[in-house]
Each structure stands twice: as C-alpha cells, then as structure tokens.
Amino acid sequence: MSAEALPLQPHRTVSKPPIYQRFGRVFLAYGILIALLFVYQAKSPHFEQREWRSIANSGMTLTIAGMGQTLAVLTGGIDLSVGPMVALSNCIIASTGDEQNPDRGLALGISLALIVGALGGLINGLLIAYGRLQPIIVTLATGYIYGGIALRVRPEPGGFVPYNRTNLLTDLQWDKVPRALFVLLGLVIFWLLFKRTRICTNIYAIGSSADAAYMSGVNVIRTKILTYTLVGFFAALAGVFLTAQTASGDANAGLIFTLNSIAAVVIGGASLAGGSGTFIGTIAGAYVLALIPSVLYFFDFYRQRPLSQDLYKGSILLAAVAVGAIGILRQRNRLDRL
Amino acid sequence: MALLSATDISKRFGGVTALDEASFSCEVGEIHGLLGGNGAGKSTMVKVICGVVAPDEGVINLDNQVVTFGSPAQANAAGVISVFQELSLVPDLSIAENLFLQREPTRFGIIDRGAMRRQTTALLASLEFPAIDPDVRARDLPLSDRQLVEIAKAISRKPRVLVLDEATSALGAQEVIRLFRVVHQLKEQGTAIIFISHRMEEVRNICDRATIFRDGQTVGTVELANTSNEYILQMMVGRELNEVFPEKPAPPETLIPALEVEHLTWEPELHDVSFTVNRSEIVGLAGLEGQGQGELLFSLFGVYGGVAGTVRANGQSVMLKSPRSSMSSHVALIPEDRKTQGLILPLTVEANLLLPVLPSISNLGVIDRSKETKLTDRMIQRLSIKTSSPDVPVGNLSGGNQQKAAIAKWLLTDAKIYLMYDPTRGIDVATKHEIYRLLRELADSGAAILLFSTDAAELIGLCDRALVMYEGAIVRELAGPEITRENLISSAFGMRREELEVAIDEVA
C-alpha cells in the first residue's frame, strides 16, 4: 500500500446544528421570562413605566452577580462567595458614606468595594488554582470569611447612601426608560466583546476539557485565577447596584445571591459541568427568578399563605429547570440522556 | 544532521521505571518510527520530548542545543509539536476555535472570527483534508474527523519536529492515506517526523528508520528498508513470535444461531441490516471506520432509542431498551472507548470487574467479600492482567491490561453474545495475541462474537466470517478463505473488485 495507491472517497460531512438546537436552553429561558412578563402585565392593576422600572431593578443585582457566576460555572467551577461579596460591597459603600461630602464618600466607597471584590476573587482564584482545591469548598470557606468581614464593617443595617446619586442607577431616564436597562446594555456589550477575547475562549476551553486546553498551551492556572478575580469583581459591582436599590448597608442582604446566581446561570442554559453556557441566558435566568415572587404575588393563594411562598417559588424553579431538560429525552443516543 | 536527539533519558513514576536510559535521534526530513509494546516507553518518551513530563535524567538536544521544556507550550514555541494519543481538542469549542486556540487572529484584543473561519477552511483545503465546517463543535464530530482536525492543528503550528503518537489509530484507511500525503510533503520541506503506530504496515509504509523500545529501554534503531517484520517483532517482544492468530476450527456440522438480526434500521445511520451470528462463531464487521459499525453494536446493546427491526438472542427476542435489558438477553458490549465507556478509571480493578455482576454476588445488597475476591482473582489469572493488586485503580494499568479488564468484566456475566468494537486498538502485539486466543476460546466454548476491527489482518486471521459495511448497510459477506485483503478493501470502498484493480493500475 503506497500513499497514492487508493482513491479517496468523498467525505461525509457534519454540519453545524441549527441555532434553535445550539441555544435551545437560552431560548427557553427567554420563553419563560416572556410568559412571566405577560402574566405580570395582565394581572397588574396599573402597569406602566414605574412597573418596568421596578422589574428592571429587581433582577439587576442578580444579573450582575450572575455575570460573575456564569464565568465560574463556565470553567467547570462554582463560586459560593458571591453572596457574601455582594453583602461586603454593600456594607463598604454604605459605611464610607459621608453626609458632609456625599460624592467623595460614594466614590471612595465604590472604588474600595470594587477593589475588595477583585481582591477577594483573586484570593479564591489563587487558592483554587495553586492549592488544587475544589472551588465549592474554597469559596464556601472564603464566603464565610467575606460575610464575617461584612458583619464587622456593618454590625447592624444602616449607613449613609446619598439618594440623589442612587437614582442615577435605579430611576427612569426621560421618565420612560429604566436606567437599569442601560446597565444591562453595558453588561451585554461587555459580554459580547469579552466572549471574543482569548481569555474567554480559554475559560470555555478549560471548562470543557482542562487536559485538552493545557495540551494546547492554555495557561490553566492563570485562567482560573483571572476568572475568580472577575467573579469577585462582578459580585462587588452587584453590591453597588444593590446599594443603589436599598440605599443602606446590610450584611445579610446579599446572601441570597449565592444560590440565586447559580440558579440563574442554570436556568439560562449553562452546564454546571462547564464549557457551555452564555451570559445572555443568565440574564433571562436572573429576571425569571426576580419575577417569580412578583408574579405570584398577584395570585390570592400565594398572598394568603405567606409561609408557603418558598414552596411555590421552589416548585416554579424546578419546573423551569425541568422544562429545559425535556429536550434531552429526545436524544436518540441513550448515553446522551444520562 | 540530527535535528532532535534524546540521550539516556530515564523516567520513573513512583516505583515504576517508564524509561531507562533510552536514546534515539531524528534527522531533518526524516520520518522516524518508534516501535514497542504498550508500556515499553514510547509514550513516555514522546511526553518527555513534548514537555508534558520532565525526565529524571538525560538530555534533549534540538539543533545541537540542549533544551528543557517545562510545558507543552514551551515545546510548541521551540517547534516541537505533537498530536497526542489522548485527543487534545476541546469538546465545546468549535473547530476553528480549537485550531487557533492561543493563536487566535485578533484585532484590538478581539478575536476576528471571520478570519479564523477563513483560515480554517483554507488550512483544511491545503492539507486536502475533508472540508469540515469550522463552526461545528469538536464534540459533534466523529472520532476520525476529530483526529484529522487534531493533526491539522499540529501542522498549522509549523512544526520543525512533528510527533504523531498513535495519530492514525482513530483513522480509517482513507484518512490514513490523506495523512500520509501530508506527512510526505512535510518531510520534503525538512520537518522531522516522529511516528508511532501499532500498525506495522503503516510504519513500514512511511518511516525511514525506526527505534524499538522494550521495557523502557531502546533496543536499537533499524533502517526499515532492509529489516524484516519478524526481526522487528523479535526486538519488540524479546522472543520469537510464531503464529499470532490461533488456528480457526473447521465450521461445525450444524449451525445454531445465537444472534439473529433482521431489518435493523436506525436512520440515517443504519439501513435495513440483517445477519446472523452462530454459536461458536467469530464474525468480523469490516469496512472503513464510521460506516455504521459502531452504531450497529450500540443499537444491539440498547443504547439508542428509536431502532426499528427485530433482534433475537438465542431464539428469544431482545428488547432494545437499555444496556440492562440487553444484558438480561446475555448480550455483552466491549465499547470503543475503554477509558470512558468500558471502564471506570478511578475505581479499582476489582470494582470494575465486578460491576456488571454485583447483584449475583451480594445478599440483600451487601457484597459477599469472599466471592468478590475469588471472582476477581480468577479473572486476573485467566486473562493474566498485570496489576500489583486488585485494589489498584484500573486507570493505573497499561492500555493492554485495561483492555483485558474491560473484556474480563463481561466474562463474569453469563453473556453468550459478545459485541466488540476494535478490542485490540492501541494494544501491543503480545497482548493482542493473548486477546485473540481468548476470543477463540470463548467461541469454542459456545459464545458468539461479533467484532468490529480496523485491522485487516485481524479480520483475516481471526474471523470465521466478515460482514463488510458501507454507509450504514452490509454490502458484502465474506466467509472463510474469501476474507482477503483485496476483498475487504474493495468492498470497504463500496467498489467492485474490477474497479479497484483499474484504480491501482492507473496509479502504477
């Protein structure tokens, strides 16, 4: 057999799956979101701009925190210190508030919060990457630490946040458009650009197969460190928005964002195994989670039993995730259904 | 002039000596084969050259300069680029992203996807590889295409030394030809190529010289043109190998059907496949890789949903519902990928062997320790699986011994029909020999074996009958002496023999 001896046959080609298949889970998340919005506006007695504002604001903190969590999940990791970091950032900003010199206090607080966020994330990343430790344990532990620091900074809720400045983020622009949407737009633009950088390709690569990425020359350690640093930074940024919303500091206010951000990422179609998912999906996931209680509130059965609220929330969340999994049952290869 | 040389390389992993003062060198424009059984040290040598593993002793010279590579990235930067046995494509990235990982064309830090796509298409075209859609994710491609992309990725990095470590093991004959054309071109351009393959025919076909490894040492380097296969085998094995394949018994008087398949269809991969495998028979599935052989075996084992047609095992109809239900019909499958589907690498040898039979050795859900030990020891002995203890993670065994374990776990079940996908892929000659004998013993004791092989010699030497598949259908059945290289190749390419002869004549 010599190299030229045999004729070549035309090759059977595989083509790219259609868009609805590749992003099915993302479309589904938006489907659920639109359905919820529909119910919301049908049930709401006065549905107008101010409602849009409150909807836009209600999911914004989670969306920003979800940006970070998306990155962690894409690497195949997870960050449980997101919530405490949101809280810490919130407490720092509220505590540096200065009634004599509000702008200076605020600028100082925000800068400090963002630096602390990135620093906390950096610590997570160093421990995970160099210590070869499981992200879930590292961030559980550092999460307690960051939460503890938040309590030290602000033992009881309060602090000073200048109202006229918080409105810059949370109010309506031209009395029409919720300003949170501009923040969202900024995040989306950031994501679309970021997704086309090497760093982001590396993040997907190590989440999909760390071995293959390493073999291709990807610096796995540096990528992980950078990822968790970004997660911390975005958690702190989420804390900035939370502060604008609540206009006070509370060491316990941020804690729900840990698990909710993970839920938002999953509803948005990302795989907890890493390597697949997108922030665009996470946005829908975050707003779905934010809207569920508001929508439920229009129903009597929910209002009459305040103690069962979590039960309903949990059921809807489960249903949302389950609907996303239905497509898997259509897989012809049973191995893909596992 | 030696472009790359490795001198007196030693490497120990714990107590195991993987390399013991091994040396070889490769010239500019030379295709140099590394030969040896599994565990002989070839793969470790390659890892040392490519910066994956740091040697304990010894030096690597590139261009007469001593080099030390701390990582694959450093080796790549020096022009030493490898196509690894373990695929290095990232499953969730597209083909284009994989090809340009770490070298993406960027504009102001933003990856230029259009350029990346165009360059991918151009690269594949320049190598005369099939036009694979640059946007397809690696995980959606068949194994052979992934391997081609892997090779393209290595070549696109403009290697001075290109290492092809079992790069052909996932390729069908057709793709191997494509690859060899490219390798010849690289050779002419002065690239040094280090070629590792378990297919002797390939090494002979393409290599100028070969270095033979045995037990971590280099036994010698030979000019292939004036060295016989027998001599090389002797160097590899250290003893003379007589007959590789066990003798085929005469066909029995009465044929008792064990596996009867009628009109099996799984569109678009399988079309109306019908055949029978009798008891005590080894039937080979032949053809180019990716013609539906893997899908056929998987569908018989209940892995796919929506399979049409009827399947009977020992006269009883088989519900193609799940591997569990196929197992209860006494069907066993030894899958293609032993590392992910055949074995659970981090679990011990014992746990792997006993996984399919746990219900039969436990009482009220508690495993009977003494039965456990007895069965494991029996299997380790019967197949002579080389492991220091049954409690070692199976992933620590060499490839050949892993494959033995993957087979052994089914011998413990009461399986009567064995489906196997290329059971000797990536395995050294001596172990192959043992597996051939084992399969024949199984058949002699009444089992029916249906196996796909990419190795023509195996189909010829081992199988009583061969079914050649082409585009999801059986196009030809060959029995006994009809199983010849010519017949296999011609029907594998979906051609009549006359056509093939014409094609060969044209080239000659």
Image (spheres, helix red, strand yellow):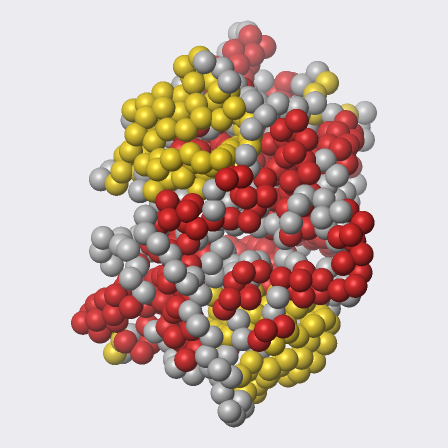
Left or right: B459 as drawn, with respect to A24: left
- Most distant residue in the front direction: B226
Asked whether residue B256 appears in the rendered view, the answer is: no
Front residue (pair B166, B214)? B214
Up-down: is B104 above or below A97? below
Up-down: is B326 above or below B113? below
Please state the horizontal and vertical placement of residue B285, each as a whole percent of the image: 60, 68
Up-down: is B252 above or below B67? below
Left or right: A69 as drawn, with respect to B395: right
Q: Residue at x 29, y 24 (%)?
A: B57
Front residue (pair A200, A214)? A214
Please state the horizontal and vertical placement of residue A218, each as a whole percent of the image: 52, 28
- Most distant residue in the left direction: B370
Left or right: B3 as drawn, with respect to A328: left
Asked whether residue B101 appears in the rendered view, the answer is: yes
- Most distant residue in the bottom direction: B254
Front residue (pair B494, A140)? B494
Q: Residue at x 32, y 48 (%)?
A: B238
Please state the horizontal and vertical placement of residue B447, each as a whole percent of the image: 44, 80
**Based on the displayed image, in which of its 4 quarters is residue B389 positioned?**
bottom left
Q: Residue at x 80, y 49 (%)?
A: B506
Please state the horizontal and vertical placement of residue B180, each as a whole percent of the image: 64, 40
Up-down: is B503 above or below B11? below
Q: Residue at x 42, y 54 (%)?
A: B429
